[in-house]
Amino acid sequence: MLDPVDGADADAFARLAVELHDASGVDDTVEAVVQFALQALNCTYAGLALSTRGQASEIAAVTDPVVADVYTLQIDTEDGPLVTSLRDRSTVLIRDTHTDERWPKWAAKVSALGVRSVLDVPLMLGDDARTVGVLGLYSPEPDAFGPDDEAIAEILARHATIAVATARHEETMALAVDARKLVGMAMGILMERFDIDGDRAFAILKRYSQDTNTKLRDVAQELVDTRRLPH
């Protein structure tokens, strides 16, 4: 395990920062985070769950199927250390699922899966401490995580927070650019077919979007693909 105060840690996190910077999207970013966790921490499994607006958390990356089971149990019931860490923006440590009494039903099921120690660390972004997600670390051994593990996990969570937020922003911007291109292509089709100007073509797309309760991008996509507006 890495000591959070030695030079090796600085080098390791520097390499991680480069790897996260080079990641091609959210999927690659979260995979790099959980794989680094396996190397840097005293855990057997790791996972990352991301928060989504108005929806349940999504399982973004796991190093073993058992982590997906651990997450699913909490997402389905909206109860457990992951949910608490996400809601309270706090690190949650379970030293032994055999004896922890905070989430007895969940702990019993997780213990049956062979997981004894759990460390959930929130990914918090900005001055408003908005929670981006939770990094989860798991071990089949009781009392597997000490203060050094918590310190390293919190440093890793800070790196992950920035990287995930950046990757999400870049993907959103890429989708926005694609949407503008699609709308422009659809407008061009309408302008040529009906001999109308750009303002009129956009008004037609917007009307179809509203009348059919369909995103403008999807209306444009269908027109480009089929050369017909949605019914």
Image: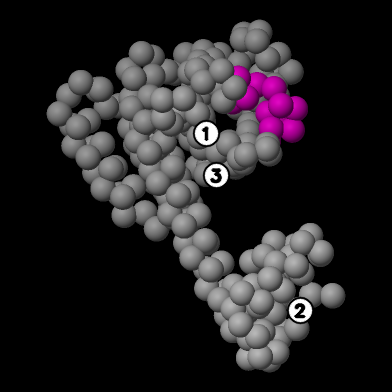
Give the percent coordinates (x, y) of residue 99.
62, 8
Specify the label residue 60 is tagged with. 3
- Between circles 1 and 2, the one closer to the viewer is 2
Q: Is 82 colored magenta in this rendering?
A: yes
Give the percent coordinates (x, y) of residue 200.
66, 77
Q: Residue furthest left?
A: 7
Confirm or deny contact between disc 1 and disc 3 (CB under 8 A): yes
Q: Is residue 23 above or below residue 54?
A: below
Horizontal side of 196 relative to 94 (left or right) equals right
Specify the label residue 229 is tagged with. 2
- Between circles 1 and 3, the one closer to the viewer is 1
In the rendered structure, which disc, 1 or 2, sits on the residue that comes first in sequence? 1
In the rendered structure, which disc, 2 or 3, sits on the residue that comes first in sequence? 3
Q: List the residue tagged with mark 1.
A: 133
The residue stretch that appears in magenta: 72-84
Secondary structure of the residue carrying numbered label 2: loop
Q: Quadrant of the C terminus?
A: bottom right
State the residue at coordinates (26%, 48%): 18
State the residue at coordinates (66%, 91%): 195
Q: Residues within 10 Å of mark 3 (few under 14, many from 20)?
A: some
Q: Residues within 10 Å of mark 2 (few under 14, many from 20)?
A: some
Quadrant housing residue 51: top right
In the rendered structure, which disc, 1 or 3, sits on the residue that comes first in sequence? 3
